[in-house]
Image: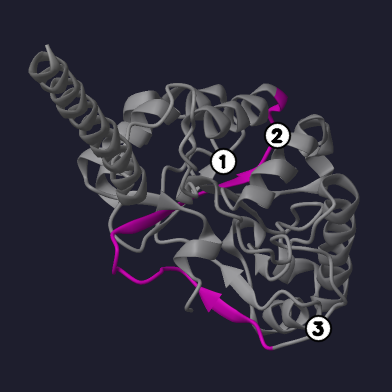
Amino acid sequence: MRRRRIAAFAALAVAAAAVAVVVVASISGTKQVAASGSASAPKDAKAPSAPNPAVAAKPVGPPPQQITPLIPGTAKVISEGPTAGRKVALTFDDGTCVECVKRIVDFLEQSGTPATFFPNGTYGASWEPQARRIKALVASGQLTIGNHTYSHGVSTQIGPAAFGADLQRNEDWIQRTFKLSGRPWFRPPYGDYDAGTVSAAGERGYRKVIMWSGTVADSNRRSEAYILNAIQYWAKPGRIILMHANFPTTADVMPRILKLLQRKKLTPVTIAELLKDA
């Protein structure tokens, strides 16, 4: 009987020791897992998110074409930009057609196509209803605004003094309408200029006299085929293309012009982008 009791006590001791070993090992293992960081996180735990580069803060700078004090300078006549990068500038003058201006602005907003406007204040009824949208496009860098004089007269026929006054009148209208400046971009009506008008433009801060190196000749009514053929012929790297916001056909054909430029592997840009190093 005594031997049986001793054996039973021994068995219990062995069993207790085995349980202790298992418990200690379990506790030790848990600590090791927790220490090593390989344990599973709770299902509702959220890992810290990495910064998203797509929403990084944009650099802060002055808005494009902000109104600043007039700084006279020497004007330079430019008809073409650099060929590097296969860029082309689509530029629109005048604005005699209210619906045409609206539809061209619609196209720019919807397609994201950069462009340049040279409006005349005498056609303010076309431009002023689109002023808020135009200002936003300029602020985003998608659009550049230049001065085309207020009255669209022949600059060399009225003399430098009258020309300078008409140029300033249009600058004042641009500032009131779009809350920005047309400087330093000026396009003479009909492409007509001489040394006197160029000097007068520079005195009023218009140091870039923008001519063109291709035109769709749409100051008169043209067919869609005519305009597209002109783009096909003239659009090459560095070219400045003259267009007008005067007839519906130009607005109608804008999506096809964009596709044609894409086929030619040309990138439309603003005049400011094309001539940023000029």
Which of the two marks, 3 or 1, is nearer to us in this view?
Answer: 3
User: In the rendered picture of this protein, how many numbered marks are placed on residues?
Assistant: 3
Residue type at mark 1 is His
Q: CA distance from mark 3 to mark 1?
A: 30 Å
Q: Which residue is mark 3?
A: 71
In this rendering, position of residue 175 left or right of residue 210 = right
Q: Quadrant of the N terminus?
A: top left
Coordinates of residue 163 in the picture (x, y in percent): 81, 69
Coordinates of residue 119 in the picture (x, y in percent): 71, 47
Residue range corresponding to the magenta coloring: 74-98
- Please report whichever mark, 1 or 2, sits nearer to the chain's N-terminal start: 2
- Please report whichever mark, 2 or 3, sits nearer to the chain's N-terminal start: 3
Please report the residue visible at 29 percent of the width from the left and 60 percent of the height from the top: 237
Residue furthest front in the image? 1
Snapshot quadrant of residue 38: top left
Residue type at mark 3 is Ile
Which of the two marks, 2 or 3, is nearer to us in this view?
Answer: 3
Q: Does residue 215 lie above or below 187 as drawn?
A: above
Q: CA distance from mark 2 to mark 3?
A: 31 Å
Please report the residue visible at 72 percent of the width from the left and 26 percent of the height from the top: 98
**Label 2: element kind:** loop
Q: Which residue is mark 1?
A: 244
**Label 3: element kind:** loop
**Residue 161 in view in this figure:** yes
Q: Which residue is mark 2?
A: 96
